[in-house]
Amino acid sequence: MPMDSTRTATDVLKKKKNGSEHPAPSARLPLLETIDSPEDLRKLPVDKLPSLAKEIRTLLLTEVSRHGGHLAPSLGAVELTIALHYALATPQDKLIWDVGHQAYAHKVLTGRRNAFDSLRQHGGISGFPRISESPYDTVSVGHASTSISTALGIAIARDLKKEKHDVVAVIGDGALSGGLALEGLNNLGSQSTKMTVILNDNKMSISKNVGALSRYLTRLLTDRRFNKLKTDIWELLGNLSNVGIGIRNMVHNIDDALKHIVIPGKLFEDMGLRYFGPVDGHNVGEIIEVLRFVKDSVNEPALVHVITTKGKGYRFAEKDATKYHGIGKFSLSTGTLDAKPSPVPTYSKVFGNTLVELAEKREDIVAITAAMPDGTGLGGFREKYPSRFFDVGIAESHAVTFASGLALQGMKPVVALYSTFLQRAYDQIMHDVALDSLPVVFCIDRAGLVGDDGPTHHGVFDISFLRTVPGAIIFAPKDEVELRDMLYTAVNYTKGPVFIRYPRGKGLGLEFPDQPREVPIGLPEKLTKGEGCAIVAVGNACEAAREASAYLEEHKISPTLVSARSVKPLDEAFYRELFTTHKHVVTIEYNTLTGGFGSSIGDLLSSMQLPKAPSLLRLGLPDRFVEHGSLDILLKNVGLDPESIAESIKGFCKK
């Protein structure tokens, strides 16, 4: 049965009352247990809020250690989240999170405390804000750099409808490196609408806190008496003919010069935003004071710069925020992962090791990623070839166009991105790479369903949108050895872009030959020979097809099993022979059926106009977003586990 995508936190809470969900946390949280909404939060005196922050961290650590999740970002944003809901009248005031992996405290404070132990589990609450889950989740998010543009749209709509509420976007310093965020800031600065951007600076990447002076300036900037005096004097000078205007210009120039020296927000003021900060992001009282001033006294675009520590309150996460950014189950006392290291390498690791191996012989190979060096397996390449490694930040579009420039000058760029984030660079792939047939290699990690992170992170559309790229080669390895071979083939290909898609997780534990081998482009591999029915599987779907084939053999169906290897191009001679020798053809892919590999086989079959064409069954992901949950559960829900595949094929062949 397909998953019910409309299930909300309310449904989870109802089941918990009936005793059919997960048990509540054992730790006593006296303040937190009184809060079921931000209205309850606002009843607490400000001096109780630091204690509340400690209780929230206790809950986050307890539950994330049990189930995994985005720990460090959420730990760092606890006081900021408390202050936002304390100072704002949410949900009437609109709070928009960027990415949303820092929003766990937000979920806890907005009625999902008792459902928090279902975080990222099938049927439980999402690891990211979702509109369907709560009225406090203004926007469904999961990708970076979107908050400012979305919030500006909401603010302008408010103005046009003559409504009265605040709009606040929370964005991290990493997400601010994304082009979309800068486009949003540029547009916001040219508007006169009332809107606030909270810059959660947890890496000190934009500016360093300048100590007592910065705190003094923050107090000065938010002091109502100072601002009123400044406004009154400014207006008075404007009325003093030429003398007043001259003084105004002189003061303005001095003010600008001083701000460049002592205020790190001059960039934002030059863009047209009123700047406040830096503010201590773990001093909840100070944040509330600044937010209230901005809410009550500022009627133009504003930016509040908040300095936080990623992983705050958990020493292991503070020491290694990257490791604890997104983590599986772990021991609270030692910080070690519950999962034992496997001798079988992940596809990401195989990719990274192979690229290092190839780069030893090819000085023209360079590696590019977008804020994912460790996630994509490029950590080893970065260490061995630092001058040939480029992490461009959260800027996938730039990564692709940057690669095109390198390719134009004879380099061999290898761009490593997650499938879901490659979506953000489609135009650059088409216009900047494919148009001139530039030999850029794209290694697409996390292709297919990824499990607990859910619909914003599943990599299930890349086959569909890459099939439209003229001249593209699209590979899908069935195992880790074939990934190595395909990467070797790709870096030696010179006629255009090559895309290699592979899944999250471990390979099959195969031994690697001494040397990688060329993979014939477009030609599938026949794994077993049968009759009547042919199964053509894409990439790691071959394993599910093998298991399904064993089941079918027990029911007197002996299928031919084929590994597609190439999604594009398709070897016409091979498929013509397959179509003419089998009555039934089945395609299996971990991609949406809409425009996927099955569609390409259907197009090819139709174009051949065979006198006795086989019937075609396409198995893949349905035309809807698939929710979060364990991979086994999700595959069963969409009918792509081995047993479901076998049943579908059995029914198809017996018709």
Image: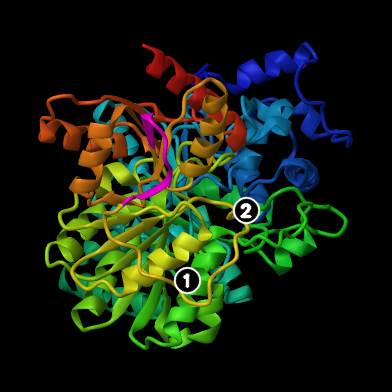
Q: Nearer the viewer, residue 238 or 340?
A: 340
- From the viewer's perspective, is 335 left or right of 2? right
Discs 2, 1 touching: Cβ within 8 Å = no
Residue at the disc numbered 2:
326
Residue at x 25%, y 51% (from the top left corner): 568
Q: How is the image coloured?
A: rainbow
Q: Position of residue 325 (x, y in %)?
A: 62, 57
Quadrant in which the C terminus appears: top left
Residue at the disc numbered 1:
206
Q: Main secondary structure of the magenta part?
A: strand
Measure how far apart labels 2 and 1 are at the Cα level. 23 Å
Q: In which quarter of the view is residue 416 placed?
A: bottom left
Magenta segment range?
524-535
Magenta span includes 533: yes
**Where residue 301 is drawn, which disc sits there?**
none
- From the viewer's perspective, is 344 left or right of 430? right
Q: Position of residue 41 (x, y in %)?
A: 69, 32
Determine whether 412 is above or below 61 in the image: below
Residue at x 53%, y 57% (from the top left corner): 223
Tell me if I can see residue 171 in this picture: yes
Residue at x 43%, y 23% (from the top left corner): 649
Determine whether 641 is above or below 303 in the image: above
Q: How crowded is the residue under tag 2: few (<14 C-alpha within 10 Å), some, or many (20+)?
A: some
Magenta span includes 133: no
The first of marks 2 and 1 along the sequence is 1
- From the viewer's perspective, is 326 left or right of 293? right
State the SS at label 1: loop
The kind of residue on which mark 1 rests is Ile
